[in-house]
Image (cartoon, grey):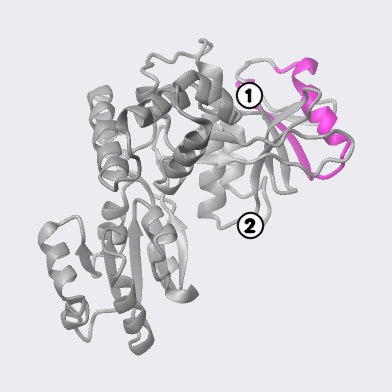
Amino acid sequence: MEMEFQRILDLRALLGRKSFFLFGPRATGKTTLIRKQIPEALIFDLLDDEVYERLLRRPKVIEESLTPETRTVVIDEIQRLPKLLHEVQRLMRSRERVFLLTGSSARTLRRGGANLLGGRAWEAELHPLTSREIPAFDLLRYLNVGGLPAIYLADSPEEELKSYVSLYLREEVFAEALVRKEEYFLRFLDVMALSNGEELHFQGLSNDSGVQARTIQNYVQILEDTLIGFQVPPFLATKKRKAIARSKFFFFDLGVVNRLARRSGIVEGGELFGKAFEHFIARELKSYLSYRRRDHDLSYWRSTSGFEVDFVVGREAAIEVKSSDLVVEGHLRGLRALREEGLWRKYLVVSRDPARRRLDGIEILPWTEFLRLLWKDQLIGP
């Protein structure tokens, strides 16, 4: 399959303001994006063993490689050599240059006491492909193979996912010695993949995996720190109904979770379609808030009495996701309950409905229309 993706993240615009850390899982396309958008940059790729060893022995190689024309310096996979950040900070103070510091794991930097440049660099993320970045977007293909560019384009995406999962976990988790017993972590991954998009119940996960609940908590943090997954926290500030306080957890990519859960063949209207569809909308919302640099929390709401709304975006929108092609009054139960709080500007249902309509004052949006309005900045404000 031949296709060119137009990525939303504009590195040149970002670096026109300040130096940046750019985080993103392996194979999301960081290196490709850098070479395409800022081809003139001086690049040090720490995955290249020769480059790594030279900078390990002599960090000043960075300064010695600069020319009067050099304006942008990229250090790829900075987590492999965090001590370089001291040299970067020195160069940022003394020379008029910007740095782009990429990483596929934030754990070493954030938890290892690394110098994070004292606020001199901001953070951005590169996510798996969004619907807007894929020409002639195919929802079913995305739900099955996910949004990693090379895998989305692959003739045999299942084989590519198998290889990616094995390599990614080995390099990002096991190679960093983040877990003591690999067999425990692999059992944990199996259970987490099967419960993707559900509330984090550590004792339940422990019972299913045979791994202690305290260890499960640590493993979940490892998944977040290595960018393999993200939590959607609960919205707790409702007054009329008490809210559940557990977060939901999603893996960063649909294809990856499908491979971990050993499932394939998601079809429209099938048993797995609804969960995958909700994960897809979560993925789009998270990417949108990141790329647009919107300062809104992405959360969900569930009351102790059983009312639930899939996603809450700041105080902008409460969003329910339904895989049905005909939304009826019964689908609005959670939104109606949450609307009593009077906290949000919009109350929306995203579904496979063929046309936009209103039901009991709640907007029913076909998923294609929802995504069109979202990426045109017509649903969520600054």
Q: Quick one: label 2, few (<14), some, or many (20+) residues within 10 Å?
A: few
Q: Relative to 14, is 212 above or below?
A: above
Residue 152 locus on image (x, y percent): 32, 32
The answer for how far apart the CA atoms under marks 2 and 1 are is: 26 Å
Q: Is residue 86 magenta?
A: no
- Single out the mark in the foreground, 2 or 1: 2
Residue 299 locus on image (x, y percent): 66, 41
> Which residue sits at x=24%, y=79%?
70
Q: Relative to 344, is 350 above or below?
A: above
What is the residue that sits farthest to the bottom in this orientation? 94
In the rendered view of the protein, which quadrant contains the C terminus? bottom right
Please state if 69 lies on the left or on the right of 20 as rendered: left
| Secondary-structure class at tag 1 | strand
> Which residue sits at x=58%, y=31%?
200
Tag of residue 288: none
Q: Earlier in the sequence, mark 2 or mark 1?
A: 2
Q: Quick one: label 1, few (<14), some, or many (20+) residues within 10 Å?
A: many
Residue 175 locus on image (x, y percent): 25, 45
**Magenta extent:** 327-353
User: Which amino acid, by three-letter code, is at mark 1?
Assistant: Ser
**Contact? badges 2 and 1 (CB < 8 Å):** no
Residue 10 shows in the view: no
User: Which amino acid, by three-letter code, is at mark 2?
Assistant: Asp
Please state if 300 lies on the left or on the right of 160 as rendered: right
Which residue has dot 2 on it? 295
